[in-house]
Structures are given as C-alpha cells and as structure tokens.
Image (tube, rainbow, N blue to C red):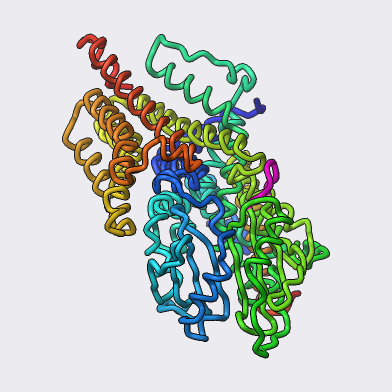
Amino acid sequence: MAILSTEQTKRLFAIHGWSGAILGLLLYVVALTGALAVFAAEIGNWANSGSDHHDPLARWVGVATTKVAADIPDEYKEEISISYDHSGDLWFFFHTHAKNAAGRLEEKGVMVSLDTDTHEVLSWQEGFRSELFSVDAADALTRFFVDLHINLHVPHPWGLYLTGLLGFVMLAAAISGFLLHRHFIRDLFLAPRLSSGLLRARDRHILAGSWGLLFAIILAFTGAFFSFATSLGLPVVATVAFGGDQAAMVEAVIGAPEAEDSRPKLLVSLDGVLRQSSAMAGTRTTFVSIEHLGRADARISVFHEPVEGGFRRSHHVFDGTTGIFLGSPPTLGAVPSAGDTVFGVMSALHFGTFAGFLSRMIWFGLGLAMAYVTVTGLQLWLKRRADDPAWQRVGRLVLATVYGLPIATCGAALAFFVSLPLQGTGFWTPTGFLISSAACLAIAWWIDDAHRLRRLCRMVLGGVLFALPMVRFLISGDGWIRLLTTQNSAVIVLDFTLLLAGAGLLYVTCRAASEAPSTSRASEAAE
Amino acid sequence: MTERSEKDDTFAALAGPRARLTRYPKTVRWILCGPGAFVAAATIMAVLPLWLPHGEAEIDHLVFPILMFPGIWAAVFFYACLERDIIRATSVITALIAVTGVMAALAATGVLS
C-alpha cells in the first residue's frame, strides 16, 4: 500500500511481529472479553435466567426509597444512587464521600437491596463503594469478565496502564499491518492457499486482518483512550492546568456545585418525577441519583437508555422539592461543547452502541475477528520458528490460552450457577475461572503432542458450552416455556446459541478425529 | 606529536554521542519507539491545554489533549520507526520531550498559564 524502503519495511515487520509475540496472548484475552462485553447486559440477564421486571425503576421506587431512608443514618443521605441488577432486584446506595484506607476519596455509605415486588430487604451492607459492589451476587459473572477486559484484574491503576499499553500495541500492529499491505483490496477477497500450513496461516491472518483493519484501529484508539484517560490523562492535565488539583479539574469538567441550601424540605413524589422523565425520554430508566435528600437544594437526576438508533443516553435533572424539570445537562461541562460531542462519539465507537442491536452484533463479530487475527498472527510467528524447542513450548502455551480462555469463562459461568443459590457468586465466579485456567495450563504442560492437546481442548470446550444451558435450567428451574411467557426470549436465544456452538464443536472434532489418518497427524500438529 | 586544539576537543565531544547512536542503531530505535514515544506523547498532552481553545463550555482545552493522546503517541511512534536518519529522529524526539517537558513544568509551577 505505502511506498517504503526495504529497511523501513523490515522495521515495520519487526514491530508488527514482536509486538504481537510479546503481548499477543494478553491482547487475545482483552479482545475476546471485549467482544463478550458488548452483550454484557444480555449475558447477565441470561445468567439470572431473565427477570420478571423489564423496567424495575418504574415500580414504586419512591415508596421504597422512603421506606429504606427511614433507617439510614443522616450522614449517608448526602447522595442516593438507585439502580437494579440483572435479576431485577432494586439497589440503593446511600452515601457520602470519605477517604479510604489508601487515602483516596471514595463513596462511603449503606448499600441496600430490595425485592422489586414486595420491597422486602434482601441485603444491607455498610462500607466503601469498592467493598460493597463486590457483594452483588446477581451481577458477579458479567462484572468478572468486564473487569477482565478493562484491567485484567490487575490492581488500580496498573491494570489500566496495562490495557492502555495493549491498546497501543494493537494500534501499532494495525497501522503497521496497513502500511505493509501491498494489495489491500485484493487481500479482502483472498482465498487461503492449501499448499502449505505456513501459507494457509498467513493467508487467513491477512484475510481476517484486512476486514477488521479499520475496526482494529478504532477499537485500539478508543480503548487506549479509556484506559489512559483517568489513570494518566486526568492527573497529567490537572497538574499542568490546576497545579495537580484533580478535584478542581473534575469540577471544571462536570460543572461547579450549586449554592447549598440546607433548610429541611420534603422530597417531591419520586415516582411522579420518574413517570414524567420516562414520558420525555421514551425509553427505560437505567439509573436515578438523588442529592441532598430532605433539603431545600435536593436534585433528582434520571438516566435513560438511548432511543433506538441513537447513541447517547438521556439525562434529565429535576428540582427535588418542586419536581420542576431543570434541563438535560451534557456529560461533560455545563453547556454543550465540541469536547463533549467527541467524547460521546468515542464511547459509542468503543461500545458499538451507535445503531442499536445491529451495530452491537457487528461489533461483537468484529471483536471475535480481532481475537482470531491475534491468534493467527501468533500461529504464523510460531510456524516460522517451529524447529526451535523453546518456541514449541510457547506453542503449547498459546494453544492452552486460546482454548483455555473460553473454557475458563465457561468454568466461571458454571461456578456462578452452582454458587447462585448460596449467594456466593462473588467468590466462586473468579475461583471457577482460576481453577479452569490452571487445569488447562496443567494439561498443556502434561500433553506434549499439540494435536492431542488441541483435540482435547476442543472436546472440553464443546462439552462445557453444551452443558451451560442445561446447568442454568437445573439450577434456576426456568424452562423455555416460562421464559417465553415472561418475555425473556433473549435467554432462549443465548441457550440455543450455546447448545448449537457446543454441539457443532463436538461434532467437528469427533469427525476430524475419525477421518484424520495417523500419517497426517504430524503435519496437523504443527498447525 | 601535534597538540590537540580546543576545536578538535569540541568535535570529539560532539562525535561521541553521534558515534554511539550510529553504532547501536537498533537499540536506539527501540528506545525511541518505546519509552521515547510514550514520554513524548505524555509531555505533548501535558502542554496542549496551554494552546488549545477553551470552547464555550470551558472544557475543550482539558478534554481534547486526553482524547488525542493515543493519536499523538501513534504519530511519534511511527515517526521514530520510519525516520531513515537515526540522529535526526533522536534529535527531534529529544527536543520535543525537552521543550514540552520544560513548558509543562513551568505551567505546573504557575510560571506559564
């Protein structure tokens, strides 16, 4: 594509190859979990076998708030966050702001969960936000793999630095791949050559990489932005513009607080405000925040899902004592600005929410393609070094990771289901993932033959994929007919997809094993 | 035996770093592409709030440097990778880091605003 000297081309090849070889496996983890995170809400809904409530915040939340607030210490009524989990239970977080053990300012208060229908208190916990959010049993599975995507479960801020660097690696690999392309249009329609394993791997890598090139650049750019924005960008810009005062910068970006009026005054009917906000937005309420409950300066902020085809969620602010609509503030700044618009576009491009379900499907598919490109790139690198015993061991590690990650994710889901009735999902979901990962790595260490290892991994993956919907049904007791009557067809679609994927993988693996003559095993193992 | 003049010593002092750069071009290139590009991108991001327009909401000069950080890094990285003359690449990136770093430090201490 580009006119480059031989020396420059060699340098680009070195960067393209080594960046993938060193960080390719971590990049694969981030790419695959990112593809799953596109449907995090649907997966969370499936893990809880759907919910009977499709708009939990429309069901007498005001009454529930008054009931819970009566038992909350006044110091925690500075702000209330109201949301719901994937099982449809309501969550209230009454909080103030205090310094945690690490000396950082964090929300501290009481977190209460309620049954949406009966308003029965299900749990009551006091502490800092980071401690309390880990007790939400229903969201443990989605929270686990979304965190794996965001920070690889490495402590803050190092996890964000790591995923930010992975974003840079992906950006470097994508741009260098584009510059190295000599026939970009032709490569979009390349038929993988079957004459040798090396050529086939190269052609597959080029084909998938060509189709996903623009997507890779967009995702790498936006992903690196989201990782570095709070971990590096905010402190650096705050240092220069505000002498290091991050609070002053946050105030400049989200707007200065209004003048305080601590005179006692009753809260307006919250349910009335929520109904008015829903009528204005036309979509489901996702989050409610109340500031200064019981005071004259109370404010109610209501957030809604984006309208179909739109990419920005609605945000309405109401006076907490009169219920008067005060406006729809932008995400950043007090008035609309170019910075706020570009920030919104970055979010939509990274999460694929700019055209509803269709764009999310495309983003999911392209996310899987990126994971595939990473794997085929690693395979290509290993094939060129197939005679080196050290790289052969790396090859087994790559195989164990490529199949081990989806197996371990399924292992985490199985652990989630089994521990759900015991409310122990917060502990058992990551434990299930770790046990499954350790088992995959141990098997890869134990089995020398790459062909046998691949076949075993495929069989195990097919088996757990097929088993997941059945375990979900056995634990929850929610069958397809009940799910249909409660309008939870998304759970059925996911069940069906998993059964089909599992059965397909088992069939293909068994068929290949029965057809493959023993003489061709050596050549297959090299792939 | 001829005596070394002051001029010769200056040339020798200048030739030292140049010789080292050209003797280990691969190592220098890796340093420029790795930590060099990252530090340059961070210092450029740090000084951009001084130059960018504030916008109606008074936030554009704060938000855009952070939004542009990956793009700045990519530009410096590929310059460091593709520049044919390793001495020029080293000079440009070192100068970028020095100038923007000093300006950022002056801004942080309140000398520049």
Residue A49 lies, with reference to residue B49, above or below; the image says above
Specify the principal SS of the magenta part.
loop
x and y percentages locating residue A16 in the rendered image = 50, 35
Residue at 25 percent of width and 25 percent of height: A455
Q: Which residue is drawn at 47% across and 77% down?
A: A108
- Give whichever of A450, A432 is nearer the camera: A432
Residue B44 x/y as whole percent: 66, 59
User: Is A306 colored magenta in this rendering?
Assistant: yes
Q: Is residue A372 above or below residue B46?
A: above
So how many labels did they put on this image?
0
Check the picture and name the quadrant holding the C terminus of chain A: top left
Viewport quadrant of the N terminus of chain A: top right
> Which residue is farthest left?
A446
Whether residue B86 is visible: no
Picture layout, residue A517 above or below residue A374: above
Near-viewer residue (A223 or A111): A111
Q: Residue drawn 40% across and 78% down? A: A101
Observer-nearest of A370 and A284: A284
x, y percentage for residue A299?
A: 67, 74
Per the image, is A440 magenta? no
Q: Where is residue A325 in the image (x, y as percent from the top left)?
A: 76, 68
Which residue is pictured at 32% across the width and 43% down the height?
A477
Q: What stretch is highlighted in magenta?
A: A305-311
Is residue A170 found left or right of A507 in the rendered image?
right
Residue A234 found in image quarter: bottom right
